[in-house]
Amino acid sequence: MTGRRRWPLWLLATGLAAAPPRLPLAAQQVPAAQQAMTLNEAVRRALAVQPSLIQAEGDQRNASAGQRSAAGAFLPSITLGGGSNKTGANRYNSQTGQFVTEPPSTSYSGSVGVSLDLFTGFRRLANKSAAAATADAADAGVTNQRYQVTAATAQLFFTALADEDLVRVAQAQVNRAKEERQISVNKFQAGAATRSDTLTSTVDLGNAQLALLQAQANLATAQANLGRQVGSDQPIRAVADSALPPVPDTTALRSAVLDSAPQLRQAQAQARAARAQVTAARAQYWPTISASYSNGYSGPDSLAGFPLAPWSTTKPYGNNWGLRFSVSWTLFNGFTREAEQVSAAVLRDVAEAHAADLRRQLNAQFTQQVAATFTAYAQIAITGANVAAAAEALRVQQERYRLGAATLLDLLTAEANLTQAAVNQVQARYNYLIARAQVEALVGRTL
């Protein structure tokens, strides 16, 4: 009976690590020509397709229509009416006992009416003020959503860029791990290293390859999310801008946020609309005075045997006109007015409290975002120095390991430090860009 050949464990591990991992079929299907897009183009396309901005623009159109309706309440209502009536007359002659049929006759009528509320207890003025405040809130809402969509798009865009840089970092890690494994194999074959070094370097290479796969998966997800944001069914590759924007001047930004931030202007306008609704609710305690005027003509289609047409002359037609004034005053309606008054006052108090709290919230958010911006900007230089130091430390450890003055653990530690330093450098750069975009969203303008 022939036994199976037993291969050394270190040789099997070395062979497995040398072969690249097989990717799933879905991961291998990379689009041949992936669409690339700059940040400005991504923002432009996102502003055209994002539902939140489309909803805000719809609210703006509704508010504009509400303003026209509130102004139209001061104008009279005009109605026109007209009609024709054709009848046939059949009557019973009691003397002859027979039905007498007369030729059919046609009559025409036309009228015009005008009505106007002369006094409504200042309700129309309050509604007009509420409509204007609602329109201001809608305008501020559009501006706010525009910058919120811009900030969200920038975050997805920079996330895609960061993931692409992290893929390059992971690929460099794989390349270094391959070199280290080859060095350990060569030293083992020369009798200058142990089998443990070879196995450890093989495991390190496998971990680096897994990290590369995870980085590639993160990049694919980020590009798909960016594609959805800009209204594309395909992943979008972000194209980086070579220039890093400087730190914004925040000297006057805090006062700009607290005075004219889109979110705050929207909340304050909503509070004004709520106060106007309180005045409109109080109008129910006043009488309503209205006036109306109507004028109409009616008559047959013929007179004295001569045919007449209502569009030719109204002289033989009867003229009926009327001018009416009316006063309506509700003295008691089961406390319905009081309930509506309390409801409007509650909405006003809530809106005013929300506007005041939002102002404090924006102040705190501005402090947080500005601190994050300056911190991330400072980290860019620090992480750059860390990468340079880690790269030099890795070079030294590689030389020492070749000479036998350092262990493999020292080499792997130096390699891990360089990888982490490179990851921190990528994250610092894009954390700064994202924090800067968040500050622009708070201020409501480009810095």
Image (cartoon, rainbow, N blue to C red):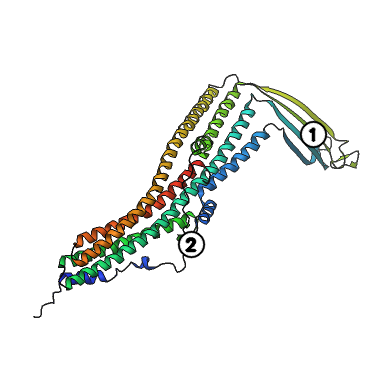
Task: Please determine whether, in this image, residue 396 is positioned above or below residue 282.
Answer: below
**Label 1 crowd bin: few (<14), some (14–19), many (20+), radius 10 Å:** some
> Most extreme residue toward the left, as rendered?
1
Assess disc 2: are there few (<14), some (14-19) or many (≥20) residues with their C-alpha within 10 Å of its C-alpha. Answer: few
**x and y percentages locating residue 373 in the rendered image:** 42, 45
Q: Nearer the viewer, residue 2 or 193?
A: 193
Residue shown at the point (41%, 48%) measured from the top left: 377
Which amino acid is tagged 2?
Answer: Ala
Residue corresponding to mark 2 = 36
**Residue in the picture at 41% in, 40% down:** 368
Q: Is residue 280 left or right of residue 239?
A: right
Q: Which mark is residue 281?
A: none
Cα distance between the residues tagged 1 and 2: 71 Å
Contact between marks 1 and 2 (CB within 8 A): the answer is no
Q: Where the N terminus falls, by quadrant?
A: bottom left
Q: Is residue 91 above or below residue 423?
A: above
Q: Is residue 145 above or below residue 386?
A: above
- Residue 30 in the image: state x and y as whole percent: 41, 67
313 versus 350 height, above or below: below
Instruction: State which tag comes first along the sequence, 1 or 2.
Output: 2
